[in-house]
Amino acid sequence: MLTKKPRPKKTPTLNQMIRMIASLGGFLGRRSDGEPGAKTLWIGMQRVMDAVITIQILRDGYDTSV
């Protein structure tokens, strides 16, 4: 589970971002796990998109008249 942390001062590397997204897809990142696979990254990206859509709805308001 991700915890709320202050924004890092240094931009994360591509490998760090891949591992962050993979962790949303269930990747544990243990020493013997190797690199995350395509399925884990796909699930992680779906979770990111769910969060983006939720934030957009909360910011713009939910239109119930449709």
Image: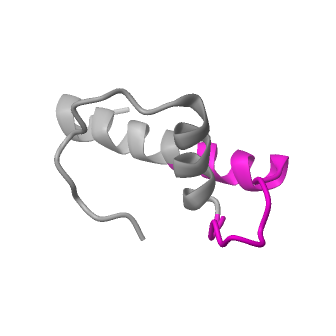
Asked whether 28 or 38 is in front, the reply is: 28
Count the marks: how many? 0
Asked whether 4 or 33 is in front, the reply is: 33
Q: Residue at x 21, y 31 (%)?
A: 9
Q: Is residue 53 left or right of residue 15?
A: left
Q: Is residue 63 left or right of residue 11?
A: left
State the extent of the magenta-drawn residues as a range: 26-47
Q: Quadrant of the N terminus?
A: bottom left
Outermost residue, front side: 31
| Residue 41 at x, y percent in the picture | 71, 47
Q: Is residue 43 above or below residue 13?
A: below
| Residue 65 at x, y percent in the picture | 29, 34
Q: Residue at x 79, y 60 (%)?
A: 34
Quarter-wise, where is residue 7 in the image? Answer: top left
Q: Residue at x 16, y 47 (%)?
A: 6
Q: Is residue 56 left or right of residue 44?
A: left
| Residue 50 at x, y percent in the picture | 48, 46
Residue 64 visible at all: no
Residue 29 falls within the magenta-colored stretch: yes
Residue 45 falls within the magenta-colored stretch: yes
Quarter-wise, where is residue 3 in the image? Answer: bottom left
Q: Quadrant of the C terminus?
A: top left
